[in-house]
Amino acid sequence: MNEDKTQRQIVRYTPNPPPRGKVDSELLAQYMYQEFKKISYVIDNLSKNRFEVLYDYPEKPREGDVIYADGINLDPTGFGLSGLFVYDSTGQWN
């Protein structure tokens, strides 16, 4: 995976479109290898609890969601603090 991808891709996988038309086995193997490599990268980051830095609130938060706020654009405390926040049963990020 290209190391200069955006932060957002740390824990999200978006598949590339598969090769079209009559495809030889080498091209298909290369495509599959690249996709599995991307999936592996995402799983590895999730297993290490790496969070993407968010700059805006999620559209539909659910109780138990965890975010990493940047502390500037996304500032749940109002004090400029960045870090991890959990969406609780009261509808607040703490």
Image: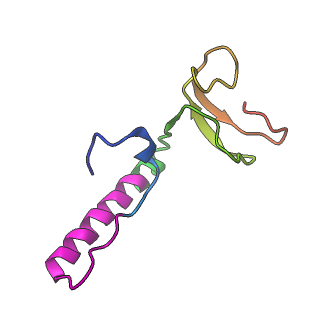
Residue 34 sits inside the magenta stretch? yes
Residue at x 31%, y 73% (from the top left corner): 18
Q: Position of residue 89 (x, y in %)?
A: 82, 42
Q: Main secondary structure of the magenta part?
A: helix
Q: Nearer the viewer, residue 46 or 20?
A: 20
Q: Count the marks.
A: 0
View extreme (front): residue? 21
Residue 19 sits inside the magenta stretch? yes
Residue at x 16%, y 83% (from the top left corner): 24
Residue at x 34%, y 68% (from the top left corner): 17
Residue at x 43%, y 57% (from the top left corner): 13
View extreme (right): residue? 90
Left or right placement of residue 69 versus residue 20 in this view: right
Q: Is residue 36 above or below residue 67?
A: below
Q: Is residue 22 above or below residue 40?
A: below
Q: Which corner quadrant of the image does residue 40 belong to?
A: bottom left
Q: Position of residue 56 (x, y in %)?
A: 60, 34
Left or right placement of residue 77 versus residue 26 in this view: right
Which residues lie in the magenta part?
16-42
Q: Which corner quadrant of the image does residue 87 belong to?
A: top right
Quarter of the picture holding the C terminus: top right
**Coloring scheme used:** rainbow
Q: Position of residue 53 (x, y in %)?
A: 50, 34
Q: Position of residue 48 (x, y in %)?
A: 45, 45
View extreme (top): residue? 79
